[in-house]
Image: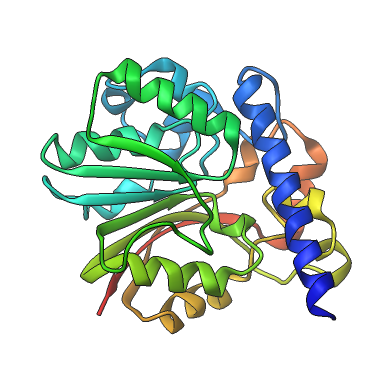
Amino acid sequence: MSTTTTQLDKQEVENAVQEMYDEVAACPNKEFHFPTGRNSCLHLGYPEEELNAIPASAVEPFAGVGYPFLAEVIQPGDTVVDIGSGSGVDALISGIKTGPEGQVIGIDITPAMIRKARKNIEKAGVDHIRIIEGQAVDIPLDDASADVVTSNGVINLVPDKEKAFKEIHRILKPEGYLQIADIVLSKPVSAESKADPQLWAECIVGAEPVEVYLDMIRSAGFENVTVIDRLDYFDRSSNESTRKAAKGLGAHTIVLTGRKA
């Protein structure tokens, strides 16, 4: 495949993802093929008291796939980077855990989500959280600038996952932590499905078999990579074809942690 074609395919995927999550931001009460909102948060393990502590307008368009804070690695005073910060749920919860002496930087590619997250941070009345535009494969932050990187249901949407994990490794301080909730598979996706940008945006075909995914993280330079939770995320989808496709590929959520050497 030529370089031009590869770049075009990646751009098509990015466009499809932006369109999907622009719609989630604009119409949070619409029924999507994946679970969203407060009920999804509670199902995934978010404590009710954490959700009650942040604006409801952040929770309504939530589209994460797990509860990455199970890793319990964020400490008061930490600098946390949230890759794919969406409407701001995980950035706001991270901000509670770091306290005002810490710093949280959310990064997203979707303009509508960025605007929504900034409004939610303003509603929350906090000044140690900020949202910037950027991509997982080209994070606009300095080397060794973060204590923790968190991400929720995002890396599966990135075509070049190896580069994303290398970027995450680059911005982490030595002995910094990674906490991720993401979709993985039990079996590989066909090349035909992989070539469909719309299917990427629907969170299944961009995912990798679990061992491939974990090996990418280790190859980027992380150690003690450990899966701490698994769950059937798509069993709550209202779309029968989505549930069927997920079951056929063994698509499920893992929550994991790792550490930069």
Q: Position of residue 58 (x, y in %)?
A: 44, 24
Q: Quadrant of the C terminus?
A: bottom left
Tell me, yes or no, if residue 7 can be seen here.
yes
Q: For the view shown, which residue lies furthest in the right direction?
A: 192
Above or below — where is 254 with respect to 167? above
Q: Quadrant of residue 188?
A: bottom right
Q: Residue at x 40, y 32 (%)?
A: 89
Q: Position of residue 254 (x, y in %)?
A: 48, 58
Q: Position of residue 159 (x, y in %)?
A: 66, 65
Q: Position of residue 119 (x, y in %)?
A: 42, 20
Asked if residue 17 lies left or right of residue 66, the reply is right
From the viewer's side, name the closer residue of 21 and 42: 21
Tell me, yes or no, if residue 39 can be seen here.
no
Asked if residue 134 lies left or right of residue 2, the reply is left
Q: Quadrant of the N terminus?
A: bottom right
Q: Residue at x 55, y 36 (%)?
A: 63
